[in-house]
Amino acid sequence: MNKIEVTDLTKIFGSHPKQGLKSLKNGEQKADILKKTGMTVGVNQTSFSVQAGEIFVIMGLSGSGKSTLIRLVNRLIEPTDGEILIDGEDITKMDKNTLIETRRKKLAMVFQQFGLLPHRTVLTNVAYGLEIQGVDKAEREKKALKSIEDVGLKGYEASYPNQLSGGMQQRVGLARALANDSDILLMDEAFSALDPLIRKEMQDELLDLQNKLGKTILFITHDLDEALKLGDRIAIMKDGEIVQVGTAEEILENPANEYVSNFVKDVDRSKVLEASHVMKKPGVLLSYKDGPRMAVRKMEEAGVSSIFVVDKENNFKGLLTIDDAIKAYKENIPMEDVLLDTVHFASPTTPLNDLIGIAAETKYPIVVVEDGKLKGIISRVSILSGLVLGKEKDEVVSS
Amino acid sequence: MNYFYFPLEDWTNHFVNEWLLPVMSGFFNSISTVLRAFIEGVTNLLVVVPPEIIMILLVLLSWKIAGKGLALFTLIGCIFIGSVNLWEAAMQTVSIVLVSTFLSILIGVPLGILSATNKVIERMMRPILDFMQTLPSFVYLIPAILLFGLGGVPAVIATFVFATPPAVRMTNLGIRQVPSDVVEASRAFGSTSRQLLLKVQLPLALPTIMAGVNQTMMLALSMAVIASMIGAPGLGSTVLSGISRVNVGLGLTGGLAIVVLAIILDRITQGLAKKA
């Protein structure tokens, strides 16, 4: 089910937004409208939907309209046109009281600059959302304490925001959003103001919390690595429009246009790619039944010095080098006895990051197996090219 | 430059004498009555209570709010005022200051809140405040006499006009200075405008508002002295009679008593602003 469904959402800043909207619908460009009328198109006829329980990341550079977009979702900024369904109800058509009620019950928000109340303690900051709903003191403090504990700030209830570090302040911000118990979390560059180590820590904790709580999260960031790490799906935004929506892999492997591909060019692929993305089908395979003689011939034909051996069901049996094959043939040793089983294994979902070290040490390709069956092999070369180019086409590998 | 004669003077006099006074006198009289009762109440309270008790209360208040130094100064200052025979005059001045500061805050702070939340009101308020602050105070002492007679009431009215602008301006400023991310966060969690004002904006603006109150009180004190020219009782009239009798000694003692009052009132309200 879609928790948030945005259709044709437009925001134009300026004196005559309706007129600008008409121009936009006539296909005029954002830049032309700015030149002609002086009005800025913040968000341009954007549509997307966020499913229950997913982390949907909107990524874009500054000025791309992403912060405007997230504020349109809870109407901190009034949309010019379009509809935003929250649990099926259009927030753009709500009257003031319904809007306030929706913000209280359904939409909690975390801000880049934290937005904590400096005159209140951590506890009363976290309880603020419940306080304005009229929840009585004992109950709201109980809930607040619970979420303070969830974000790992137990013991700091009585501190004031200015006594805490940036990372801790954002934990307070997160706790405040969690205390409200709303299904949807809007996170506006929530970790962007934090230094890299703390940011990583917060990202990991958010993922942990998400595993436990299963919120629907709309996350805004300008950091592609963050988007790739957190997002179940990612929308890339440029000039007020969403240019591509997809999973991290979809975006890395099939960029919709040059803008996206330029964007993802420098990404640290090792964190995103998995073994299955860079593995190849081995060029030659030896069936278990074939015998050493056949093995030597196959290797000669392919011009390789080792060959992978599988049984009829494609179960991986081992690696046979040319030297061992010749030895087995000459001395008439059963092939099982000369198979090397000292190769390294990986599962299709092993992150590439974990394979780099192994690949550097081992002489032979890494074998990708799933339930005992050979899925593919990964050579040092394919890891490197995977890091540079992304997923490889299947091709013959010589080892 | 006199291409034509602009009879502003005649018009104003006509307006005041022919319309304002006869038609509105009932209205002004009732304001006058209420205010007079208020001022007299405060003055009587301050005069009837033995000076020693007021002094002790003031010293304790100074101690609590601004520390030992001010407490000591307050003690010496009160003894000084008493020993130059100006205690009653000082209390009359203080009561005019207190009443007009009270009125200024009562009217000024809500106006400041309105202008912080409403652009149109802010745009209307600004020239009015400029006018109130720059118009020479003697100019509105004249209509104050006409409308409210002589004595404490016109003094409070003139003081109110003079001292209200900082209360409005500083309240406006204080609320506008509340960081926008805090306001945004509060709105995002579903605060009503009222909750936003009471739980976020006013508490965060309080130090600035208190600085405005401090300014208001200082302006009120200076005006309460000038208002002695329209018959306001108090230290101002002491100084005024010093001037008219060319009595340098009387002028100096009255003047020093005013300075002492000013310092005590200023430090106490400043201390409040810092604590807010």
Image (spheres, helix red, strand yellow):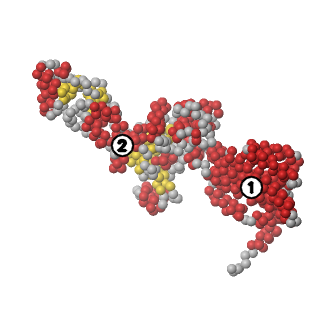
Q: Which residue is mark 2?
A: A267
Q: Nearer the viewer, mark 1 or mark 2?
A: 1
A370 relative to A36 in the view: left or right: left
Tell me the kind of residue under disc 2. Answer: Val
Residue A146 in the image: x percent, y percent? 56, 30
B88 relative to B7 in the view: left or right: right
Alpha-carbon neighbours of circle 2 within 10 Å: few (<14), some, or many (≥20)? some
Q: Nearer the viewer, residue B206 or B241?
A: B241
Q: Are marks 1 and 2 in contact (CB under 8 Å)?
A: no
Which picture quadrant has residue A203? top left
The answer for which chain carries disc 2 is A
Q: Which residue is drawn at the image coordinates 43% and 49% (left, top)?
A: A61
Residue A17 in the image: x percent, y percent? 50, 56
State whether residue B29 appears in this view. no
Q: Which residue is drawn at the image coordinates 47% and 43% (left, top)?
A: A192
Q: Which residue is drawn at the image coordinates 48% and 32% (left, top)?
A: A209
Q: Which residue is drawn at the image coordinates 34% and 35% (left, top)?
A: A353
Residue A283 in the image: x percent, y percent? 20, 33
A266 relative to B91 in the view: left or right: left
For mark 2, give the secondary structure. loop
Q: Are marks 1 and 2 on the same chain?
A: no
Q: Which residue is mark 1?
A: B218
Residue A181 drawn above or below residue A330 = below
Tell me the kind of residue under disc 1. Answer: Met
Q: Nearer the viewer, residue B160 or A89?
A: B160
Q: Nearer the viewer, residue B165 or A38?
A: B165
State whether residue A339 appears in this view. yes
The number of discs equals 2
Residue A139 in the image: x percent, y percent? 62, 31
